């Protein structure tokens, strides 16, 4: 197997749902051996997550699960069985990283908080990812992605003025908390390489979101201005830098839109030329950014009139050729079937899956010149690697494996 | 104590797109030297500004995204002497991070290939809107355009009843830039770990478009595995079919997000008791409400619809903060929709030391801003210095340059 950046790093992956598996997806894509510890009695709900391919859920036919768990291994382990718990400790002892995204308190209740993990493996890197973190007065509170997005300010800042928040139509904070955890784990590995020292990384999903609106918080603490005020959030118009035009405009067809962002006068002139220099656009009212901001309603209406009959991709090409920042609001189908950029960069991949057949995946960001990440295997079946991991990683003999199996440990 | 990256030196040539990646590394201990043109980074011209007065050192955007960095002014576009200083500076560094349009550095005679040839252990990371090649490589972008093309916007928006004909909506805060930077940091750290084993550097091509395209959760698998596109809904997950609302307005006008109600029977019992104490949900004692699956929205269950109607009435009769905390105390993972600044009012995050204080031109007292996205037990996040003034460290860094050996010589 090719040498990948994280080759030789073993991750005991206790995560489930999306945030934790996103973190381990990154690590696995870059070559870490990620071993998902799963339980048939408390299965990862995403194994039942839609879209399900086929008539009935089998725990192995969720497209949702498959998308987030490529390149990983899965073992079945009943950690509530005393022998199963011992096996978990043996796995931790030979792992570099333990990562989990349970509610805070769960690992402690298992007798596996950081100090206890250190007794098993002194230089362990333990990453916990919970809604509110392991300290603080509300640490027992819990989140899902949408809850965290509401609490951290992200849902509020997405929407049209005078309307309810539009928020995010997916768990952006599950992704982002996972990405944050992946970075944190790699930083801790870097530190361990230098000092031999492991550590506990405590991540709160809400805090990982609060850091994504720093300038808005500073506008309050420096200028006393809250985003909760009339006219905010400004929809697709710009907040800062305050520029216009900056919006989405309709195109020909059902639910087709183009985003256009004009950042300065030169880009405005380029847009005016691309539009064929209509009389309204050459009016001095629109010559400066201040004027365009003042007359933004009229400006947006005029541009929308111009875009509405046009085909979105052709319009994007026209505008980009003129030097105007513009892009189609692409759906998943557009990116897969029409987007020439993703296609040209070999973004789409196929891997065989035992139950799902050939499965499509998107690629790995970023591209590393010497050790690019690799798609090596589709998502694992529940418990697919139990035998292999017990024998080769945990170091069980054939007899020992049989004894554990007979005792009901691997379920 | 110092951060995990304390021995790392990064040279950053970034405007608004890549500056967050530099911050993430700097906040964890790396010595990040930001090389700016004489006019300064574009971010210095992005508001809001202190007291709304623009100035190179008054941008709150720059303050936030450039903590812990040092600023050096070098005129890379026009001065061969400065380009030579830049080469010498890069020779002392582990990582070069840049976000200029593809070919810009090469045009200055500072291309990644030549820099890596001079120092094979160097890691160069380019963060750009579309990557270094492909038909769109030279197209121009912005956070809005990136979120449109990458897919997030098509998933954010409204039910027709809330805002007829509404377009896809961009979440604010430059989340496209953030997501690109998350991946740039992954690439840099992965390359550093590879270099630890082999001594070899490499080039990293980070495309914001690709970063966003794989950050839309259920949107992508629905197309890849069932050839269906999801539709936008008000403040809840986009889905292939319209689902029940989970956004509710409280008595004080604020909104709550309810992702699930009484997911297990234990928490349902607590919730039921709480509702019934103030006269709501009296029918919840009926046996048909005992099935946890039937209680959850999104499955067409009449019990779920009835529960959500009662929940809406309960919430409309109470203030949002009361409902949020009351729900959480009863094991409901509910959230209150806060504006970014309202997070400052929540004592939990102060308990954890999340908010930190910074300072800068035009204010006479420290001000709070978000701090660490993670708490490291051994090598914590730390605010060592506020964002630098333009060129604040030019003399200091150039003086070091004559004293400091190149990185290769240091390691020998």
Image: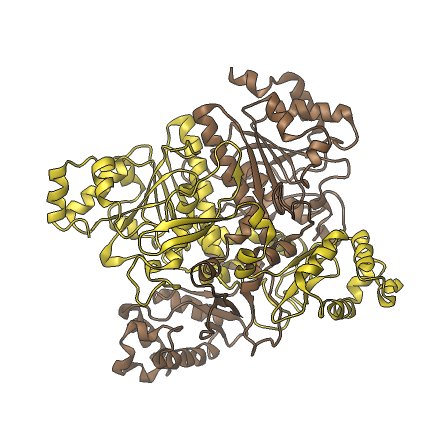
Residue A85 pos. (x, y %): 20, 46
Report whether A259 appears left or right of B210.
right
- Residue B205 falls in image quadrant: top right
Q: Is residue A34 above or below residue B407?
A: below
- Residue B285 falls in image quadrant: bottom left
- Residue B258 falls in image quadrant: bottom left
Q: In percent of the image, x 58 and y 22: which residue is there?
A: B119
Work out whether residue B45 can be spotted: yes
Q: In percent of the image, x 52 and y 60: which residue is there?
A: A332
Q: Which chain is yellow?
A: A
Q: How was the colour assigned to the protein in this rendering?
A: by chain
Count all numbered tags in the image, as a single digit.
0
Report whether A280 appears left or right of A25.
right
- Asked whether B120 or A276 is in front, the reply is A276
Q: Which chain is brown?
A: B
Residue B232 pos. (x, y %): 53, 68
Residue A249 pos. (x, y %): 69, 66
Work out whether residue A136 can be spotted: no
- Asked whether B343 or B239 is in front, the reply is B239
Q: In percent of the image, x 50 and y 45: which residue is there?
A: B372
Q: Is residue B395 above or below residue B60?
A: above
- Asked whether B167 or B94 is in front, the reply is B167
Residue A114 pos. (x, y %): 31, 41
């Amino acid at each position: 197997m090719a040498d990948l950046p994280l080759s030789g790093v073993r991750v005991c992956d206790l995560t489930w749902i999306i945030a934790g598996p996103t973190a381990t997806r990154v690590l696995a894509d870059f070559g870490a051996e990620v071993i998902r510890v799963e339980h048939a009695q408390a299965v990862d709900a995403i194994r039942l997550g839609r879209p399900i391919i086929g008539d009935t859920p089998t725990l192995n036919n969720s497209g949702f699960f498959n998308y987030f768990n490529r390149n990983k291994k899965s073992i079945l382990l009943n950690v509530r069985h005393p022998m199963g718990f011992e096996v978990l400790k043996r796995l931790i002892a030979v792992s570099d990283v333990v990562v989990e995204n349970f509610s805070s308190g769960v690992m402690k209740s298992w007798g596996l908080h950081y100090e206890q993990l250190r007794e098993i493996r002194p230089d362990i890197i333990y990453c916990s990812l919970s809604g509110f973190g392991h300290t603080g007065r509300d640490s027992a509170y819990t989140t899902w992605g949408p809850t965290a997005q509401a609490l951290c300010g992200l849902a509020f800042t997405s929407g049209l003025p005078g309307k309810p928040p539009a928020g995010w139509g997916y768990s952006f904070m599950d992704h982002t908390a996972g990405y944050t955890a992946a970075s944190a784990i790699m930083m801790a590995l870097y530190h361990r390489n230098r000092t031999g020292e492991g550590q506990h990384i405590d991540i709160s999903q809400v805090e990982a979101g609060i850091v994504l609106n720093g300038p808005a918080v500073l506008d309050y603490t420096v200028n006393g201005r809250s985003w909760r005020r009339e006219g905010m959030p400004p929809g697709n118009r710009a907040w800062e830098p305050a520029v216009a035009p900056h919006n989405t405009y309709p195109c020909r067809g059902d639910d087709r839109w183009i985003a256009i962002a004009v950042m300065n006068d030169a880009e405005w002139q380029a847009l005016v030329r691309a539009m064929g220099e209509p009389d309204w656009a050459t009016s001095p009212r629109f010559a400066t950014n201040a004027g365009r901001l003042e007359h933004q309603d009229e400006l947006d209406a005029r541009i929308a009139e111009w875009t509405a009959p046009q085909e979105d991709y052709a319009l994007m090409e026209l505008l980009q050729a003129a030097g105007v920042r513009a892009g189609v609001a692409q759906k998943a189908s557009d990116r897969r079937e029409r987007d020439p950029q993703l296609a040209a960069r070999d973004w789409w991949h196929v891997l065989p899956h035992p139950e799902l057949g050939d499965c499509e995946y998107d690629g790995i960001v970023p591209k590393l010149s010497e050790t690019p990440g690799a798609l090596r295997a589709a998502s694992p079946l529940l418990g697919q690697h139990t035998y292999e991991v017990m024998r080769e990683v945990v170091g069980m003999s054939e007899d020992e494996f049989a004894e554990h199996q007979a005792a009901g440990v691997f379920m | 104590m110092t951060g995990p990256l304390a021995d790392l030196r990064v040279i950053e040539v970034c405007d608004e797109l890549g500056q967050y990646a530099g911050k993430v590394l700097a906040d964890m201990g790396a010595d990040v030297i930001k090389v700016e043109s004489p006019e300064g980074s574009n971010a210095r011209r992005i508001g809001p500004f202190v007291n709304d007065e623009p100035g190179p050192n008054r941008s709150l955007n720059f303050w936030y995204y450039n903590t812990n960095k040092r600023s050096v002014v070098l005129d890379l576009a026009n001065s061969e002497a400065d380009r030579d200083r830049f080469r010498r500076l890069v020779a002392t560094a582990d990582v070069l991070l840049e976000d200029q349009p593809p070919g810009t550095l090469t045009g200055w005679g500072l291309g990644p290939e030549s820099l890596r040839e001079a120092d094979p252990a160097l890691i160069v990371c380019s963060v750009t809107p579309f990557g270094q090649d492909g038909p769109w490589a030279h197209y121009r972008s912005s956070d809005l355009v990136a979120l449109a093309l990458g897919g997030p916007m098509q998933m954010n928006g409204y039910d027709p009843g809330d805002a007829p004909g509404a377009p896809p909506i961009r979440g604010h805060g430059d989340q496209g830039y953030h997501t690109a930077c998350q991946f740039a940091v992954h690439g840099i750290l992965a390359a550093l770990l590879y270099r630890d084993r082999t001594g070899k550097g490499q080039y990293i091509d980070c495309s914001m478009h690709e970063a966003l395209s794989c950050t839309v959760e259920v949107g992508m698998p629905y197309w890849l595995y069932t050839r269906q596109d999801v539709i936008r809904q008000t403040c809840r997950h986009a889905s292939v079919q319209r689902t029940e609302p989970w956004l509710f307005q409280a008595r004080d006008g604020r909104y709550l997000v309810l992702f699930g109600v009484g997911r297990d029977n234990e928490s349902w019992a607590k919730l039921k008791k709480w509702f019934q104490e103030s006269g709501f949900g009296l029918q919840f004692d009926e046996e048909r409400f005992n099935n946890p699956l039937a209680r959850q929205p999104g499955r067409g269950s009449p019990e779920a619809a009835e529960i959500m109607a009662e929940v809406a009435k309960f919430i409309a009769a109470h203030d949002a903060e009361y409902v949020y905390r009351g729900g959480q105390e009863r094991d409901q993972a509910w959230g209150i929709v806060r504006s970014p600044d309202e997070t400052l009012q929540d004592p939990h995050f102060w308990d954890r030391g999340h908010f930190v204080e910074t300072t800068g031109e035009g204010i006479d007292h420290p001000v709070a801003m978000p701090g660490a996205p993670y708490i490291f037990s051994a090598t914590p996040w730390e605010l060592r210095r506020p964002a630098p003034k333009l060129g604040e460290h030019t003399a200091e860094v150039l003086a070091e340059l004559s004293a400091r050996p190149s990185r290769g010589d240091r390691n020998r």
